[in-house]
Amino acid sequence: MAQKPTLKDGLVQWTMQEARRLTGDPVGSGDSELINKPLELLASVISSPSNPTKPVPPVGPKQNQNAASISISRSDDRDLILLANLETAIAGTVRRSAPGCEAFVGVIVQRTTPKSPFGANWALRGIRFGKADRRKADVAITTIVERMQREFWLSDD
């Protein structure tokens, strides 16, 4: 029997649509395959267990063992998003997440270096709660950021 969609499912769907709108993706352009594919991917990510598989190391020539740093390239198909758009999407979603969060001010996102090939290149640096209920806002932020880190890569702009 199919489960009834919850408020959290609707919140995630709205967040993804808002983020895609901010990135300039064509939502409602008439090509339903372009619209449904990201939503199907999001649904599969949300419903899948949170134990990721380890990536297979590439076969090739040995790398220099004395290299000062390891460069991690973007090897997935996450959508690029601007820093300001990401902060706006997260804050807007938190405001709509629950009663008591309407006064939420915003978040501060910081660019980071991913620790793994599938890690995110951004993280929260700070949260401005304003007069919002901190407990409710914190729960919403945790859920939203975790899922958006799987879906969006911070662009270089």
Image (cartoon, rainbow, N blue to C red):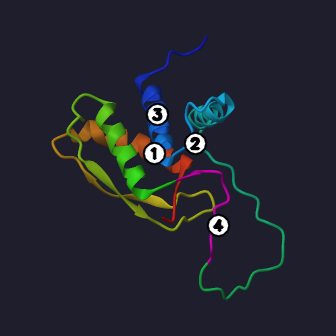
**Residue 90 covered by magenta stretch:** no
Q: Which mark is residue 12?
A: 3
Crowding around mark 2 (Cα neighbors within 10 Å: few <14, some 14 to 19, many 20+) is: few
**Residue 71 covered by magenta stretch:** yes
Residue 85, percent from left and from top: 41, 51
N-terminal-most mark, 3 or 2: 3
N-terminal-most mark, 4 or 1: 1
Residue interval drawn in magenta? 70-80
Amino acid marked by disc 1: Leu
Query: With 94 as the anchor, is 2 left or right in this view?
Result: right
Q: Which mark is residue 50?
A: 2
Nearer to the camera, 147 or 153: 153
Q: Residue 73 carries which label?
A: 4
Secondary structure, mark 4, is loop
Q: Distance between the residues labelled 4 and 2?
A: 23 Å
N-terminal-most mark, 1 or 2: 1
Q: Mark 1 points at which residue?
A: 22
Q: How far apart are marks 3 and 4 (CA)?
A: 27 Å
N-terminal-most mark, 3 or 4: 3
Amino acid marked by disc 4: Ser
Amino acid marked by disc 2: Ser
Is mark 3 in CB contact (under 8 Å) with mark 4? no
Residue 154, percent from left and from top: 50, 58
Check the image and report above or below for 155 versus 85: below
Is mark 3 in CB contact (under 8 Å) with mark 2? no
Residue reaching furthest to the right = 60
Secondary structure, mark 2, is loop
Q: How far apart are marks 1 and 2 (CA)?
A: 27 Å
Callout in the foreground (3, 2): 3
